[in-house]
Image: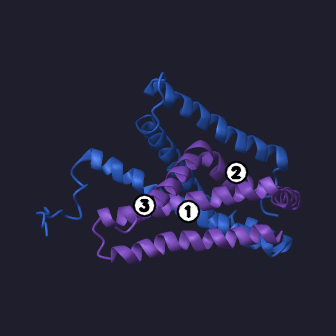
Chain colours: A blue, B purple
Amino acid sequence: MRRPWRPAQRWNWWQHNPAYRRYLLREATALPLFVYALVLVSGLYRYTQGQLAFTRWLEAMQSPGWLAFHALAAAACVLHAITWIELVPKLLVVPGISGPTIKRGHQVAALIGSAVIVGAALASWPLGGAGS
Amino acid sequence: MKRSNEPIAWSLFGAGGMLLALIGPGLVFTTGFLLPFGEPVATWHAVDAFIAHPLGKLFLLAVIALPLYHTVHRLHHGLQELHVPLPHGLVALLCYGSATVLTIASASWLLVR
């Protein structure tokens, strides 16, 4: 049986190279976004318990801690989007369309996509529920 | 030879990554800031009507399940890359298992409505 030599790698291999640090930061965006998905699941669960429970959940989300968390999650998601779309031309190769064009197309699609979500939300319910 | 589950995991990872890139920032802003500060009664009715619609259910399941599979995939591989001394199989089970359990729970809650 083949027994290849495996070089020992220390746990802090990423500390001294900026490219490795950027890579790990990119991977780390998954942590706040995982918690964000859990928050969505909790909101859906509270929804199943009825209007009062869901309104309590909305009020909990007004707390400074959750607002700070969502600011962090939004920043992580923007970083994720930038780095993800950076890699799209390497994964999606379309004959006749250049890599930079594919990247630019995804960047425009992402701006439109997020704007549509926010626009649809603004059109669906009036704001002004703080402290209610 | 035992077949690898990696293609399935990667497909879900890729779909979740693309979804988060294309609508993620808007989604976090909406549910993190616009939803809590909406007028409560109107917000409830808007959410209720959204979940009542089959496409609303499908959308919500997608924005819950795909980011779950995307993020657990990265966390699973990230823990390995940082040489966290946990058994590889156990971490994989906890990561993809929790994503699957939460996906099934969310789907059933959406179908109850």
In this view of the protein, can residue A65 be seen by the observer?
no
Identity, as a three-letter code, of the amino acid under mark 3:
Glu
| Residue B87, horizontal then vertical, whole percent | 33, 77
Q: CA distance from mark 2 to mark 3?
A: 33 Å
A30 horizontally vs A45: left or right: left
Q: Residue at x 78, y 53 (%)?
A: B55
Q: Residue at x 65, y 39 (%)?
A: A113
| Residue A106, horizontal then vertical, whole percent | 55, 34
Comparing B83 with B10, the one in front is: B10
Which image quadrant is residue A49 in?
bottom right
Query: Measured along the vertical axis of the image, is residue B67 above or below residue B80?
Result: above
Which mark identifies residue A5? none
Labels 3 and 1 touching (C-beta < 8 A):
no
A121 horizontally vs B22: left or right: right
Q: Residue tagged by mark 3?
A: B6
Q: Are marks 2 and 3 on the same chain?
A: yes
Q: Residue tagged by mark 2?
A: B30
Query: Measured along the vertical axis of the image, is residue B89 above or below residue A122?
Result: below
Q: CA distance from mark 3 to mark 1?
A: 16 Å
In the rendered image, the quadrant that contains the C terminus of chain B is bottom right
In what element is the residue under mark 3? helix
